[in-house]
Image: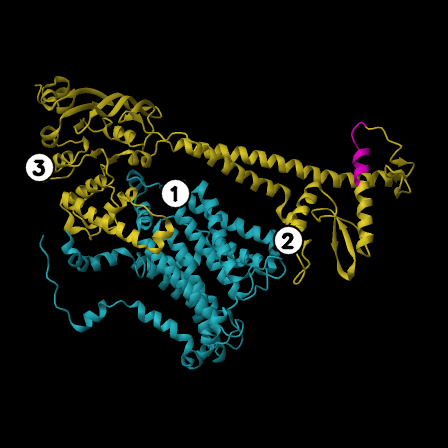
Amino acid sequence: MSRLDVEKLTVRFGGLTAVENVDASVASREIYSIIGPNGAGKTTVFNAITGIYEPTTGKIEFGGRDLARPFTWKVGLAAALVGLATGIAAALFAVNVDALWRATIRRNYAGPGATFSPSAAWADVGNYWRGQLALEPIRGGRWAIRTADARRTLAFAPNRAEAEKLRERYQELIAVAHYERKPNHLRSTTYIDGLVLKSRAGKVLDRFDTEEDLQLALARYEGIYRESAARRRNAWLALIAGIIAGAAGTLTVWSRARRTPEVIARAGIARTFQNIRLFRNMTVLDNVLVAMDRQLKGGVVRMALQTPGIRRQERDACSSATKLLDFVGLADRRHVLAKNLPYGDQRRLEIARALATQPQLVLLDEPAAGMNPAESLELNTLIEAIRGRGHTVMLIEHHMSVVMGISDRIAVLEYGRKIAEGTPEAIRANLKVIAAYLGSEEVT
Amino acid sequence: MNKRQPAPRSLTAQLDRLPQWPLYLGILLLYPLLVYPEKVLFQWTEISVGMQLTYIFIYAILALGLNVVVGYTGILHLGIAAFFGIGAYITGILTVPAYPFGIGFVGSLICASLGAALAGLLLGAPTLRLRGDYVAIVTLGFGEVTRFSLRNLEEITAGMRGLNPIPPPTLPAFLATPLSWLGIQNDWALDYRLFYYLALGLLLVVILLLRNLERSRLGRAWVAIREDELAATCMGINAARVKLSAFALGCGLAGMAGCLYATALTSTAGPDAFDFSRSVIMLCCVILGGLGSLRGTLLGVLLLIGFDNVAAPALDGFLQRANINPDDNPWLTFSNWKLMCFGLALILMMRFRPEGLLPSRQVEAELHSEAQLHREGASI
């Protein structure tokens, strides 16, 4: 059964094609090598497999399935929640949260010792939304009649009862003004009687000396109506735009992170890097423990309190990390900082770190780079031993002693295309490979 | 495996290996109880060193929060003061008598921490995928946005005046008697020592929890992200989530410090107390002490904030009393040289000790590797 299937993989960077139509099928517990001259696209294949690059076209299946994160109800819920939060935040900005605070909290609480009723505050949210005029106490026991956002003061009254009456009147005036100033509206005789504004019931609301004054007053009241209507409209717009923007943003971010290195690593593919990428200022042991992250459980609170369960788990993790370091021969250096290790040891630490994620497939990117013949011989036994532990190994290598010594199958890349694949013997005899890779010396 | 035999050590070398923190903790615990240092030793400074120590503890919590973000996780955060301010203003809104909530100190401490952490989450979730300098710009911008919001939302935050008075915490009844035996009055306004112990206690709790986190899975993931984000994600670490956790925790601690600050000051102190320079000074504390090091950060705060709050005013007072500067010449006032000294200290640090005064794991790991190997030797 094949563990990893790469079908027609193409990776392009702008106009440059790094890998073109590469197929590869790696069987379980196989050692599969990719060789080829520098710049042939070997590391690009690795990067595409581990999710660092998105394949331009082609399919990568691991154990028979695509590793991209599936769309679940959780993603939909998260998008909806983020959208709602964004929408509400935007709507709060649109209705002017500062004025809303004044309308709900300040107007309902007179100061220390006074009572505060949340239900009245909640009712004031509705009043603010509808643009109802509000009463505010001012100095000297007097009252002011103001717009809901307190930006305009309409009138003053000597006491509360008087203020209520005035508010009633202004409310009606605003309604009349809104009715009378509709576009293409013929002047009604119900509300305007000469220079007098009346309510529907016929009560006189206001008198004016000239027609101009009357029109000015109507415009002013209409302005108040329009302000609150505009606020409502803007709030709805902001809410809807916020929901759409928030949800769309969440889905965009999610869709871009469907095939991240982290998802792939969790599915069971681990790798090393051509230019060593250790956590340089961490100890050797910590480097391995970081890779065991997925196997450790417990939330932030339990970690902060170091509960006995967490401690036991930590001890177990330390001992299995030490065993792993023993496997690559670094156990006695586990408290050294990674950057202080010699080069060959750093390579082996990277292998140990990759193994610590408990992968089914290990990708080794030039593990023997910079090693002397004796060291690379040791590496051969190490890679064999890794296979012996049940891992499948994929290898990029230039050292022919390593490649030819341990590979089950070898693929040869040149200029982004696969030119040959087969057993080491077959590759050794392949004329194309000899011409392309081993140079003309053999041919002449 | 070839084990080295432990070399026989002299008495002084053995003393050197003893942990030093109990000594420092003892001094800090005893300091307010002794009359001598405050009344005699520091009398010349004419300021209450104990009271300033309280503020140093509060800033230490703030710096430790910043250290989680900048030191451990390597995200350059230039707006920590915003979260400090958010904590202070949440405390103000929830406790001042002008508003109906009045939930008291403990409630506001929790709300301020959680509120600031939530603000951090909201800021971090969309922006932490940016890399390097861009995050720094986002946090810098957020800091200014927050300051201007605090200034302009006048109905909520009272604008430039700030919210006050913030009532002091209430002391549990069972503590009042033992404290009176120690000679501590049950009055937060008259006796700084209640708040001193409160801030010290919270600081110790924060240190303990951070130390535990530092040695746990999450702490390792933070540092791994700082060291090499790509390699960390290739090891199965969800970089976005890990960074977000560090950001939320750091901002939550800043909010907690903000709550303590506002309560100690009995006022939210106005939006300008939480400006960019506050963020930068906290960053300087962390860098001076050593990025990613708990002890280093504490030392950095002690040096920089101690210099700012204690040494500079004390020297000013001294100069004035010695009548060296009768015509009020600005060149002869020490406070005017303060920022110059900060800058000089940082330049010298960067030149001679870029890793900070007390760098973390590097030294620790190298020092303890030998001893730990011997201790664990049997387990392999």
User: Residue B150 or A98: which is nearer the viewer?
Assistant: A98
User: Given the image, on which type of amino acid does mark 2 rest?
Assistant: Glu
User: Residue A192 or A223: which is nearer the viewer?
Assistant: A192
Q: Secondary structure at mark 2?
A: helix
Question: Which mark identifies residue B241?
Answer: 1
Q: Disc 2, disc 3: CB below 8 Å?
A: no
Q: Who's cyan, chain-wise?
A: B
Q: Who's yellow, chain-wise?
A: A
The C terminus of chain A lies in which quarter of the figure?
top left
Is residue B289 visible to us here? no
Q: Secondary structure at mark 3?
A: helix
Q: Nearer the viewer, mark 1 or mark 3?
A: 1
* Dot 3: chain letter: A
- List the residue tagged with mark 3: A377
* Apparent side of residue A146 relative to residue A413 in the rendered image (left or right): right
Residue in view at x 71 percent, y 42 percent:
A131
* Dot 2: chain letter: B
Q: Residues within 10 Å of mark 2 (few under 14, many from 20)?
A: some
Separation of residues labelled 2 and 1 (CA atoms): 36 Å
Separation of residues labelled 1 and 3 (CA atoms): 41 Å
Region of the chain picked out in magenta, as a range: A174-184
Residue in view at x 79 percent, y 55 percent:
A160
User: Given the image, on which type of amino acid does mark 3 rest?
Assistant: Leu
* Apparent side of residue A9 relative to residue A105 in the rendered image (left or right): left
x and y percentages locating residue A80 in the rendered image = 50, 35
